[in-house]
């Protein structure tokens, strides 16, 4: 009778099936499981750079020719610069010299007038002559010359005619009197000669 009661005892309802999954285990497995490809977000792909065209390589002969051409151009530019600088320097020196000489010409004129005056003092006359000689030597050393005028044919590029006269003994356009000496330095006129010209 006891055996029949043991068979009829059912399994308690709150008994767990040991073969089924444990809830905590399921949560851990779902967290550790990798996401499917459909769940992952697609990564943006960078556009591929277009292939660069390869630059043609220059041979050594062409490179040498280009270097030689650059050198010749540079040498020509330097030569032109040197000539231009030398020309500008000469021009500046000529201008400075002409202006300096022009500033001293009134002294020359005063010495010339003093020499034309009659005086009985020979020492005074000798002193003026020596002063004028030193002045003229200084002008010559600077390359300054007196413009020939008296008896010369009138040249408007060197002479300034302030008077005209009728002189049958002188030829036409001949300078018969010089009022003020003119000077030139090379081809540059520092001061025109002030003259009287015969018609």
Image (cartoon, rainbow, N blue to C red):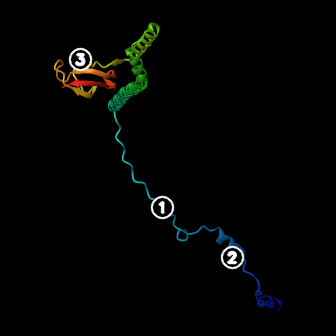
Residue extending furthest toward the top? 122
> Which residue is label 2 attached to?
21
Point out the residue furthest to the front here.
120
Image quarter of residue 68? top left
Q: CA distance from mark 1 to mark 3?
A: 103 Å
Of the residues tagged 1 and 3, which is closer to the observer?
Answer: 3
The N terminus: image quadrant: bottom right
Discs 1, 3 touching: Cβ within 8 Å: no
Which of the labelled discs sits on residue 151, or is there none? Answer: 3
Tell which circle, 3 or 2, labels the residue nearer the N-terminal end.
Answer: 2
Label 3: state its secondary structure.
Answer: loop
Q: Residue at point 48% right, 61% down?
A: 45
Q: Residue at x 79, y 91 (%)?
A: 4
Residue sitting nearer the eye, 197 or 71: 197
Element carrying mark 2: loop
Within 10 angstroms of label 1, few (less than 14), some, or many (20 or more) residues? few
Q: Residues within 10 Å of mark 2 (few under 14, many from 20)?
A: few
Q: Nearer the viewer, residue 52 or 135?
A: 135
Q: Is residue 97 left or right of residue 163?
A: right
115 up-or-down from 5: above or below: above
Dot placed on the residue nearer the N-terminal end, 1 or 3? 1
| Image x and y of residue 167, in percent | 19, 21
Residue ID at (45%, 9%): 121
Residue at (34% x, 36% y) in the render: 58
Task: Return the disc, 1 or 2, that comes first in the chain's sequence.
Answer: 2
Q: Percent from the top left, x then y, of residue 62?
A: 32, 32
Residue 140 seen anywhere in this rendered image of the structure: no
Whether residue 53 is visible, yes or no, is yes
Residue 59 percent coordinates (x, y): 34, 33
Residue at image mark 1: 45
């Amino acid at each position: 009778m006891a055996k029949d009661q043991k068979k009829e005892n059912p399994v308690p309802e709150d008994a767990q099936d040991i073969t089924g999954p444990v809830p905590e285990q399921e949560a851990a497995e779902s967290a550790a499981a990798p996401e499917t490809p459909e769940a992952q977000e697609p990564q943006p792909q960078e556009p591929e750079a277009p292939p660069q065209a390869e630059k043609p390589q220059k041979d050594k002969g062409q490179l040498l020719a280009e270097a030689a051409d650059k050198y010749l151009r540079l040498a020509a530019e330097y030569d032109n610069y040197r000539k231009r600088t030398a020309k500008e320097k000469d021009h500046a020196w000529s201008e400075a010299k002409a202006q300096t000489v022009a500033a001293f010409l009134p002294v020359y004129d005063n010495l010339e007038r003093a020499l034309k005056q009659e005086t009985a003092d020979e020492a005074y006359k000798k002193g003026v002559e020596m002063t004028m000689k030193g002045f003229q030597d200084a002008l010559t050393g600077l390359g300054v010359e007196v413009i020939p005028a008296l008896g010369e044919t009138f040249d408007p590029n060197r002479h300034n005619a302030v008077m005209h006269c009728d002189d049958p003994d002188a030829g036409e356009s001949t300078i018969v009197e010089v009022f003020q000496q003119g000077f030139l330095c090379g081809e540059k006129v520092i001061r025109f000669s002030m003259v009287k010209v015969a018609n």
